[in-house]
Amino acid sequence: MELLKTLSPKLRRDLLVLFAAGLLFWSGLAALLPTLPLYIRDAGGTSQAIGTVMGAFAVGLLVSRPWLATLADRRGRKIVLLIGISAVAIAPSAIW
């Protein structure tokens, strides 16, 4: 807490905005993930389709994280954030 007091008001405000944006982004994704199997089932998907989609999500995370971490180290975090935001924004329109 002492560290926050030493920061300039502008930097504190910027950090607050960054933390709020991260919280809202991840809360939105985490809120949609548990409903995905229900959506697939209501759209006519089988239990196998639900398992495939949820498994693909997990495998996609495992495969993409090392690549995205390397990209963030080499080119900066902004590009990785833009890729993530784009994926989350486009993904719902790609369903069915």
Image: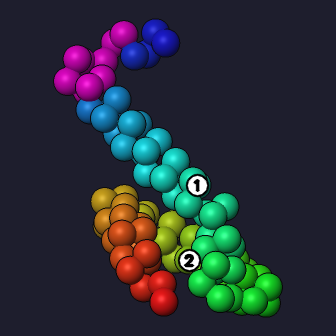
- Secondary structure category for the residue under label 2: helix
Picture coordinates of residue 4 (x, y %)? 40, 16
* Residue located beneath label 1 in the image: 30
Asked if 15 appears above or below 59 in the picture, the reply is above
Asked if 51 appears above or below 5 in the picture, the reply is below
Q: Please identify the dominant SS of the magenta region.
A: helix
The part of the image, by quadrant, that contains residue 77 is bottom left
Picture coordinates of residue 92 (x, y %)? 43, 75
Tell me the colour scheme of the image.
rainbow
- Secondary structure category for the residue under label 1: helix
What amino acid is found at the position of numbered circle 2 in the picture? Ser
Identify the residue at image location x=24%, y=18%. 8
Q: Residue furthest left?
A: 10
Identify the residue at image location x=34%, y=29%. 16
**Residue 64, numbered label:** 2
Front-most of residues 15 and 95? 95
Whether residue 52 is visible to the viewer of this picture, yes or no, is no
Tell whether position 29 is magenta.
no
Asked if 96 appears above or below 32 in the picture, the reply is below
Mark 2 and mark 1 lie on one chain; the one further toward the N terminus is 1
Give the magenta range: 5-13
Picture coordinates of residue 94 (x, y %)? 42, 85
Identify the residue at image location x=26%, y=32%. 14
What amino acid is found at the position of numbered circle 1 in the picture? Ala
Q: Residues within 10 Å of mark 1 (few under 14, many from 20)?
A: few
| Residue 10 appears left or right of 37 | left
Q: Are marks 2 and 1 in contact (CB under 8 Å)?
A: no
